[in-house]
Amino acid sequence: MTSSLNKVPLIGGQTAPQPATYQRQWNDRILRGTRCDALPLVETYPWQPIVRQRLDEVVGLQRGWDGYTGIGVSYTNAVFAEQLISAVCHSCNVQPQIVPGSRGDLYVEWHSLNGDVELHVVGPYKVYGTYEHMITGELVDNESFSSDFSKVSHWLKEISEEYSHDRAAA
Amino acid sequence: MRPSSLPDYQAPPLSEVVLGVQFQEIQGYQQIHAGKVWDLFKQHFPIVQEQPSLDKQFELFGMQHQPPSGPVVRAFSVAPHPRYWFCSASGEYLIQFQQDRLLFNWRRHHDDTLEYPRYEQLRDRFSGYLTALNDFFSANFGECLRINQCEASYYNTIPALGDTADWVSIFREQSGIGTEFSFSNRHITLGTDGEPLGRLYVECAGGIARFNEKVLVLNITFRGMPKTESIEDALKLLDVARAEIVGKFDSATTSHAHKKWGKV
């Protein structure tokens, strides 16, 4: 009954028939085995290619890169960080900086005239965030996050928007 | 044991069910060890196929939109590991394994006479496979499975005789639509503490199946992070996923359809 429908391995690996319109291009390319190289990457922000390139670099760091026993950023952490950045940046026009940690971890940092947001990605769903707003003086240090990053989205919105001193005083 | 509050059907229109987990990569594990993993399952899954690997996927919450679902980091420094399909001789059952995933599929596989074996049986079998893989990693690499995401997917192929709206309540207000339609949405499932447990994805579309038959494809997937990285908590989240999926299936389909499928 289902043999003439597309059979595509989406996330989760199902082989069941799929709606023809659902990520067809992506799935077709998966089927042709050209998954990573040929796909047009989803670009949401102009700086996204730069971030991806940077993530590639930090994943490829060799042992001892820091002059001690540092290892490269784990691929899992890099993927998690990239998905996190893409998700929280809808309200932010500030380009994030990627800084490798020495144990496979990494830091994602946003710096603007309004303030700073720093996320320490220790592992998937294991993130510590620090936030400082220069105008309001608000400071959050080392707050723990797992899967809900709504507060980070808010922080980024705060540091990226035009800030009036009237508002800060209010 | 099936919760009594869950809707039940004698003949659900399922064509495939997938239970799966994503886990942290095991230090020291390399692709060359995949044969040893197959040895764990070979007796009942004698056929092997290679497929492109699945990208890592994390369900994140609190944002107004989801991250793009395309490929993300192109890690040239990481050698790709294929996704192995270990298939049962009949093709009805399938284990999918890659360095950070284990999935278990039941497929009707072109045989409409096959009876859906039910979630409880699939869950028990998947639990056994997870334990076997965990024991293998523990014995050979000194690491246990650290599960960071679970997912369950139910794929329904509904032979839609007559009006689409007779089968799927989503289209009740739009009778007479043809085969060129699709619908998708998603929503967050909250735990008792108000924190997100996971996200439910619903996709429905029309299509033409074998023998030029008009069908509706209704796919429902749940993904989320288990409370801890243990197998036990992963299975608990799969139980939640199953309940969410079955509940959504029930609400998304019509009483006419329920009658045809023998709703108990």
Image (tube, coloured by chain):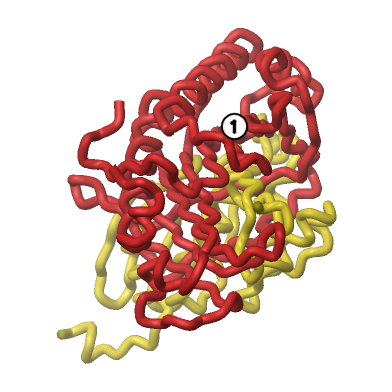
Residue B152 coordinates in the image, percent (x, y):
47, 43
**Which is nearer the eye, A134 or B260?**
B260
* Secondary structure beneath label 1: strand
Q: Amino acid at mark 1?
A: Leu
In this rendering, does residue A102 appear at all?
Answer: no
Quarter holding residue B61: bottom left
- Pointer 1: what residue? B102
Q: Colour of chain A?
A: yellow
Q: Residue at x 35, y 46 (%)?
A: B262
- Quadrant of the image containing the C terminus of chain A: bottom left
Q: Residue at x 33, y 40 (%)?
A: B240
Residue A110 coordinates in the image, percent (x, y):
49, 66
Left/right placement of residue B193 relative to residue B201 reads: left
**Which is nearer the eye, B249 or B149?**
B249
**Which is nearer the eye, B227 or B198?**
B198
Q: In this view, which residue lies farthest toward the top?
A: B139
Circle 1 crowding by C-alpha within 10 Å: few under 14, some 14–19, many from 20: many
Quarter holding residue A53: bottom right
Q: Residue at x 33, y 86 (%)?
A: A163
Quarter holding residue B104: top right
In this rendering, does residue B148 appear at all?
Answer: yes
Residue B69 coordinates in the image, percent (x, y):
59, 61
User: Measured along the vertical axis of the image, is residue B54 above or below residue B34?
Assistant: below
Q: In this view, which residue lies farthest toward the left?
A: A170
Q: Residue at x 36, y 76 (%)?
A: B172
Left/right placement of residue B117 relative to residue B64 reads: right
Residue A118 coordinates in the image, percent (x, y):
44, 58
Q: Colour of chain B?
A: red
Q: Exactly how many numbered labels are in the figure? A: 1
Pointer 1 chain: B
